[in-house]
Image (tube, rainbow, N blue to C red):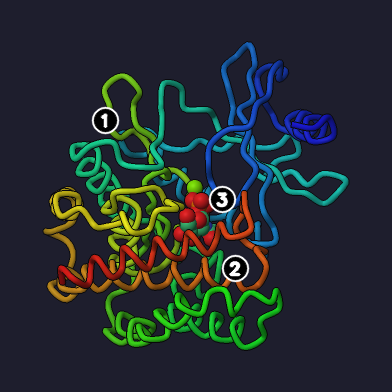
């Protein structure tokens, strides 16, 4: 961490109503969107985030939703995120450079996984994300605010890919013609789920495995995190993102795509875990849509990674020039592997 980054983060901590001064600060986690830090104090640790306002144009919508979700879950058993207000009130601090910050209590004794370690973890994770949906089912009206309009509008994601390919602003189209061609061939997946007119519910919308904290000692799920896109959506989106991030045999950026495949036992574990939470609650049409949700989310995420590659890596942080292309290839390989089983 550079000195200016450290100084900005420490100054941001001071704007929050914490019980003791911050004595240590380190980068934390592997999320793609915000900068996350663990801040130590004599009265326990806190999680500090500098929010990405390129991605989220309306940070107040996120703060409102977070406050409502936290208040709702506070009335129920189990762990939850606990946001800390600033000294001036409200959940967001804006610094002199215009950056927005927030703080949560740090959940001690937890860990997260980028790749699923075993079947029991997968099944428990799917049940925990299903429980999260159910716990929000009686959230008092109105619906949560739409923090990212069109987030799972797969048609729009696909159209954006076509635009990026046509404009080719980074001169990369020729280098990804095969991946582009494969996605164009899957065009029906851009609209198939949306055409089903399924019930809209409050869902998490980003149920990747590392958005769940597990208890480090027992291995049991403790807390669903990253509520930034928790808003109206489809049950099939959450199921699909679980398949996308837990059913494969590899990391999201596995370079050896020939090895990438869906593991049938993982799929079964996701289905068991999720249905244990929601089977008495979803409609038959929703239950029938889950596999299409998985195909759709793999397709959508492949479109998103490839779009970002074509646009010159503006959205997802990259560690090498072809990082988003590799990520897109993994999604495509998983999509084709799932299709072969469907
Ligand atoms: C981002 O923030 P994070 O890392 O949990 C992204 C998801 C993508 C995911 C791909 C707001 O999730 O939609 O599926 O990366 N979040 C946003 O790994 O775009
Ligand atoms: Mg995250």
* Residue 306, position as x, y percentages in the image: 52, 70
Q: Which residue is mark 2?
A: 308
* Residue 59, position as x, y percentages in the image: 65, 57
Foreground: disc 3 or disc 1: 3
Is disc 3's CB within 8 Å of ligand 1? yes
* Residue 310, position as x, y percentages in the image: 61, 73
> Is 181 on the left or on the right of 35, as rendered?
left
User: Foreground residue, 229 or 305?
Assistant: 305
Image quadrant assignment for residue 143: bottom left
* Residue 251, position as x, y percentages in the image: 40, 48
Up/down of 175 relative to 225, above or below: below
Give the residue displayed 37% in from the left and 56% down from the top.
139
Q: Residues within 10 Å of mark 3 (few under 14, many from 20)?
A: few
Is disc 1's CB within 8 Å of ligand 2? no
> Please, what secondary structure does the residue beneath circle 1 have?
loop
Give the residue displayed 79% in from the left and 35% down from the top.
5
Foreground: disc 1 or disc 2: 2
Seen as rendered, the residue at the extreme top is: 42
Q: Is residue 274 visible?
A: no
- Specify the label residue 114 is tagged with: none
Image quadrant assignment for residue 85: top right
Q: Which residue is mark 1?
A: 220
> Please, what secondary structure does the residue beneath circle 3 have?
loop
- N-terminal of the pair, mark 3 or mark 1, is 3
Image quadrant containing the N terminus: top right
Could you tell me how far apart the alpha carbons at marks 3 and 1 are, in whole angstroms? 24 Å
């Amino acid at each position: 961490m550079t000195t200016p980054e450290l100084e900005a983060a420490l100054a941001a901590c001071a704007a929050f109503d914490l019980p003791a001064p911050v004595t240590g600060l380190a980068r934390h986690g592997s999320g793609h969107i915000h900068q996350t830090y663990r801040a130590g104090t004599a009265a326990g640790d806190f999680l500090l985030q500098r929010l990405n306002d390129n991605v989220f144009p309306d940070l107040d919508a996120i703060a409102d939703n977070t406050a409502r979700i936290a208040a709702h879950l506070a009335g129920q058993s189990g762990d939850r995120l606990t946001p800390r207000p600033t000294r001036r009130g409200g959940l967001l601090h804006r610094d002199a450079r215009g950056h927005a910050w927030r703080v949560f209590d740090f959940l001690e004794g937890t860990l997260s996984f980028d790749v699923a370690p075993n079947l029991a973890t997968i099944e428990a994770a799917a049940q925990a994300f299903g429980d999260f949906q159910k716990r929000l089912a009686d959230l008092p009206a109105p619906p949560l605010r739409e923090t990212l309009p069109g987030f799972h509008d797969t048609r729009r994601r696909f159209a954006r890919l076509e635009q990026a390919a046509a404009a080719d602003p980074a001169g990369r189209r020729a280098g990804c013609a095969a991946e582009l061609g494969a996605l164009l061939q899957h065009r029906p997946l851009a609209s198939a789920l949306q055409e089903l007119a399924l019930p809209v519910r409050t869902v998490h919308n980003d149920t990747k495995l590392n958005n769940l904290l597990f208890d480090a000692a027992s291995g049991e799920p403790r807390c669903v995190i990253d509520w930034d896109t928790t808003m109206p959506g489809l049950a099939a989106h959450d199921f699909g993102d679980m398949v996308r991030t837990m059913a494969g045999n590899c990391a999201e950026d596995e370079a050896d795509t020939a090895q990438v495949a869906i593991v049938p036992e993982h799929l079964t574990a996701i289905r068991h875990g999720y249905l244990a939470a929601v089977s008495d609650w979803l409609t038959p049409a929703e239950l029938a849509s889950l596999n299409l949700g998985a195909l759709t989310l793999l397709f959508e995420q492949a479109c998103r990674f490839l779009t970002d590659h074509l646009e010159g890596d503006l959205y997802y942080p990259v560690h090498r020039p072809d990082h988003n292309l590799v990520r897109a290839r993994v999604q495509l390989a998983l999509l084709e592997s799932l299709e072969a089983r469907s």
